[in-house]
Image (spheres, rainbow, N blue to C red):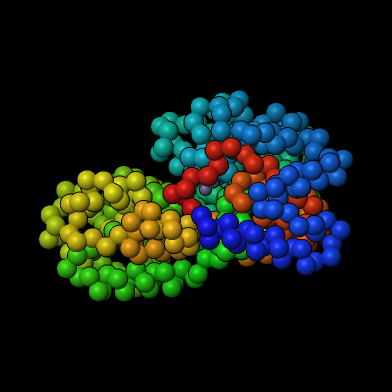
Amino acid sequence: MHEIRDEVAAFACRGREHSLPHAVYIAPATAHILIQKRTADISRTAAQHWIEPHAHGIYVKPADTWIDPSRPAERALVTHGHADHARSGHGAVWATPETLAIMALRYGTEMGTPVPYGEGFEHGGVKISFHPAGHVLGSAQILLEHAGERVVVTGDYKRRFDPTCTPFEPVACDVLITEATFGLPVFTHPPIEDEIAKLLAARAANVDGCIVVGAYALGKAQRVIAELRRAGYEAPIYIHGAMQKMCELYAAHNVPLGELIIATGLAKAELKGAIVIAPPSAMNDRWAQRLPEPVTAMASGWMRVRQRARQRNVELPLVISDHADWNELTDTLLELRPSETWITHGRTDALGRWCELHQLKARALDLVGREDEDEG
Ligand SMILES: [Zn+2]
Ligand SMILES: [Zn+2]
């Protein structure tokens, strides 16, 4: 955590050098207070009257509909299939066809109305449409149009190439409601090709053992597999049984993953020289003890923080994230230049501070339950 704290402090200090009216020095711990105080300035804007941020989701008043609610809601718009956004138990659900398929896989017979990318519908005087977010298969930004205003909710997103999902599309808007999972300047994700090369080199150096890669079961696992294929790795890839159905779902949605073999129950000799992908939770349990001399790797944006890698006994940290890094977050803001930015979750204080320094109005929402460490 020290690395992060130091980075926030350095960031806040840099702000001091600017001679903007609001650029007073603020201690990192109190940064959010200043940003929240400034919400008084923006409470007059129209969006404030029809979109309400609550701790458990974003409420679209005229449509009486919630976005990614963390509690069961009568009507829900769901940005993507990760558990912190797509909960079970809602009445009506609108999501992309891929997200609905993922929800059905996770929660059983979940019903919903599919809304393909670029298409939309009207509900309660609000025009609602879904646009690619580039985060995982089916992930969407949601555009809400009402009272002459355009509000975009990014959900989780990234700007980098990902062979497993439709790339992010910038959508012009007045209000951008953005995530900030990696909203600190210290978080710059390296090119994925470099990380995959590290993985392949580790495998080549350990032919008598195996490399076990911890990767979130929805999105990250399939992306690591698809990137290994893109790098020319054609051998079978071994997976934890818990990932089988999600990998099949991806393959059924035209994301080829090559030959996958369930690692569970195989003899040690069969896994020599193998790359094994497993959910992070399986890495330190009995399942992993049956692998031959495993080198432990983990694919996550959090691997940028050395201490986190050490805490989890990760020998080969792979900085591979499905979230926008600091540059992607700030480049997107500069590209869209929304009149207001609402920051839902993650490092809301640092990104809010950056917005101030760039004369962009910002507001931290601090939604609850939005950070799943393994998802990063
Ligand atoms: Zn997500
Ligand atoms: Zn999330």
283 horizontally vs 224: left or right: left
Left or right of 278 on screen, residue 192: right
Q: Quadrant of residue 271?
A: bottom left
**How many callouts does the rendering have?**
0
The percent position of residue 350, horizontal first and vertical second, equals 66, 55
Q: Where 324 falls versus 235 (above or below)?
A: above
Q: Is residue 135 above or below residue 318?
A: above
The reply to whether residue 158 is in sight is no
Q: Please indicate whether residue 370 sits to the left or right of residue 224 in the image.
A: right
- Left or right: where 49 falls relative to 243: right
Q: Residue at x 23, y 47 (%)?
A: 287
Horizontal and vertical percent position of residue 11: 67, 62
Q: Position of residue 51 (x, y in %)?
A: 74, 37
Residue pictured at 80% horizontal, 59% vertical: 23
Q: Residue at x 84, y 65 (%)?
A: 19
Is any part of residue 278 visible from this angle? yes
Q: Residue at x 48, y 62 (%)?
A: 304
Frontmost residue, 141 versus 15: 15
Horizontal and vertical percent for residue 266? 15, 52
Residue 233 sits above or below residue 258 on the image: below
Task: Reply above or below: 373 against 108.
Answer: below
Residue 159: which quarter of the image? bottom right
* Camera-side residue of 282 and 92: 282
